[in-house]
Image: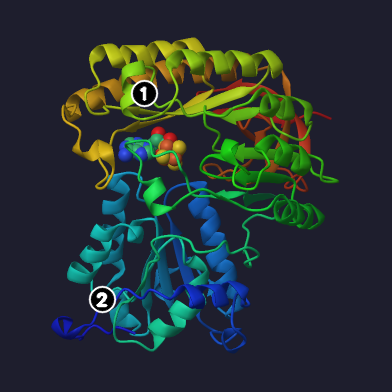
């Protein structure tokens, strides 16, 4: 591994690229080669995750691989022998934060010269990040991307025996790696990846470049995994993909079929899915959600903008009218559905009128929650070179207006629930208040309830007694 005294000028910083034959051989192999199983007993790892649920789930896979190698997890940086940053590239400030954090933990190498520091996930898929590591952060020991996460055991082994940065970033996936060990977090709720990558190429988005083209796992493999999870006591399964409606296009099946199959697994209580896009949201899919009782009444349906002109330059592939009609079609069949969305403000050339169209759409749809973002240019995406940038002050002002409108609506929805009873899956202690437990309704609303023994892990009816913008409070109804 790299130590602190290395001569940067002499480093041979290669990006390792295995041949196709090597990749195929790897696909057939055990996730962790026999010689590495338990080899690292006594060593500890700390994984820091940024970004979306896909990244969180990748972290569970990496934890599973490391545990198979004998590592145990720690939350204490000073105790760690391996610190890995699983990164997000969707917005620039997340990237800056990661580099800041890596710099901050570097001195830990003085205390523990065997400490390995690594960066993985979406950021290393960008050439600019690879170059930045080589030039400015050559003391980082390990760099790998989204397509070779399963190579972690081998890469750790190489880094332990190397003076150089071990950098292995495949630019696309050659095969689909299934059945890796996973160290899932709470024993209650599990993510299951159904599809990798995205084909949509929205002009602002780096995901198709960092995660590659859409690839679907087979229905059998997904249902098997779900069955195993339910047998192990998991109550809630979230199907993950960048664009779940397109699931199975490459296999000749569709998402509605998968949803029905997963929803009918014996003993399953709750099924969620994310992210659903407005394209290809068929009547058959709406029917599958409506008719499968375990599928929760919550759809995350990113709209990004309410202006047809902006939707078109974003390459979103639908109009405001199509989107509003889709919301109508969904609500006609699933009357209590909670709708949430993502919205970008300050996209290049967005005018006041465009922004007003977004505000109007938000008032018309009345989302339960909206995740709002200031546009952030990503090198390599078409939008990054578009003219007519919106000034930061204007973008910030628009973001605030949008949040004010949405927060009022979110609060109104929550207040309407006061006095009703909702089924809550109790997850554990509240993150903010030790005296309380927290859980979620089927519509994904966060509910706080007084701490009581034996509740964690159960589905209970909760009478909602008070509400604010983000949370509900209630007591178990007996
Ligand atoms: N700038 C700002 N927000 C972005 N998103 C994706 N790319 C960008 C970007 N370049 C947002 C979109 C997406 C969510 C996950 O992140 O709203 O739905
Ligand atoms: Fe990005 Fe668009 Fe694909 Fe979503 S659908 S991941 S926003 S390119």
Quarter holding the C terminus?
Answer: top right
Q: Nearer the viewer, residue 470 or 211?
A: 211
Q: Residue at x 30, y 64 (%)?
A: 102
Decide if ligand 2 comes within 8 Å of the CB at mark 1.
no
Vertical position of residue 360 compared to residue 142: above or below: above
* Colouring method of the image: rainbow
Q: Residues within 10 Å of mark 1 (few under 14, many from 20)?
A: many
How many dots with numbers? 2
Q: Nearer the viewer, residue 361 or 102?
A: 361
Q: Residue at x 17, y 29 (%)?
A: 389
* Residue 73 location (% of width, % of height): 54, 70
What separation in Å lies between label 1 and label 2 (alpha carbons)? 43 Å
Taking 49 as reference, is 392 left or right? left
Classify mark 1: helix, strand or loop: helix
Q: Nearer the viewer, residue 244 or 160?
A: 244
Q: Residue at x 76, y 37 (%)?
A: 260
Question: Where's ligand 1: which quadrant?
Answer: top left
Q: Residue furthest left?
A: 9
Q: Which residue is mark 1?
A: 311
Residue 126 shows in this picture: yes
> In the figure, residue 298 lies in which quadrant?
top right
Q: Residue at x 30, y 77 (%)?
A: 165
* Residue 210 location (% of width, % of height): 39, 53
Residue 422 shows in this picture: no
Q: Which residue is mark 2?
A: 139
């Amino acid at each position: 591994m790299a130590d602190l005294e290395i001569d940067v000028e002499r480093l041979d910083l290669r990006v390792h690229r295995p041949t196709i034959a090597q990749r195929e051989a790897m696909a057939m192999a055990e996730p962790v080669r026999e010689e590495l199983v338990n080899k690292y007993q006594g060593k500890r790892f700390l994984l820091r995750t940024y970004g979306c649920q896909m990244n969180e789930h990748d972290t569970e896979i990496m934890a599973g691989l490391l545990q198979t190698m004998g590592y145990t997890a720690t939350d204490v940086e000073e105790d760690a022998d391996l610190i890995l940053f699983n990164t997000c590239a969707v917005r620039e400030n997340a990237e800056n934060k990661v580099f800041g954090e890596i710099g901050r933990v570097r001195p830990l190498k003085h205390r523990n010269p065997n400490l390995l520091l690594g960066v993985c996930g979406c950021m290393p898929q960008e050439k600019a990040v690879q170059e930045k590591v080589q030039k400015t952060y050559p003391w980082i020991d390990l760099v790998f991307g989204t397509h070779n996460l399963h190579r972690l055991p081998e890469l750790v082994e190489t880094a332990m025996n190397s003076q150089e940065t071990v950098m292995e970033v495949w630019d696309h996936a050659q095969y689909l790696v299934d059945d890796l060990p996973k160290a899932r977090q709470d024993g209650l709720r599990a993510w299951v990846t159904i599809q990798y990558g995205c084909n949509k190429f929205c002009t602002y988005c780096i995901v198709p470049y960092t995660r590659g083209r859409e690839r679907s796992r087979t229905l059998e493999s997904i249902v098997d995994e779900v069955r195993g999870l339910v047998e192990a006591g998991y109550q809630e399964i979230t199907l993950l993909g960048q664009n779940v409606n397109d699931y199975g296009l490459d296999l000749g099946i569709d998402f509605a079929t998968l949803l029905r199959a997963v929803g009918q697994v014996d003993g399953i209580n709750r099924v969620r899915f994310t992210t659903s896009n407005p394209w290809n949201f068929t009547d058959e899919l709406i029917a599958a959600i409506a008719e499968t009782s375990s599928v929760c009444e919550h759809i995350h349906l990113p709209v990004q903008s309410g202006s047809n002109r902006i939707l078109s330059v974003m390459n979103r592939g639908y109009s405001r009218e199509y989107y509003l009609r889709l919301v109508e079609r969904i609500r006609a069949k699933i009357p209590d559905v909670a709708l949430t969305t993502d919205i970008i403000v300050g996209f290049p050339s967005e005018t006041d009128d465009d922004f007003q169209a977004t505000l109007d759409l938000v008032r018309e749809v009345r989302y339960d929650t909206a995740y709002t973002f200031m546009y952030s240019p990503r090198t390599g995406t078409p939008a990054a070179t578009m003219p007519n940038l919106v000034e930061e002050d204007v973008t910030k002002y628009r973001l605030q207006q949008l949040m004010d409108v949405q927060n009022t609506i979110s609060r109104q929805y929550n207040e309407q629930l006061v006095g009703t009873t909702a089924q809550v899956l109790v997850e554990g202690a509240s993150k903010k208040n030790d005296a309380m437990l927290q859980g979620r309704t089927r519509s994904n609303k966060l509910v706080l309830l007084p701490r009581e023994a034996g509740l964690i892990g159960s589905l209970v009816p909760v009478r909602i007694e008070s509400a604010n913008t983000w949370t509900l409070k209630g007591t178990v109804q007996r």
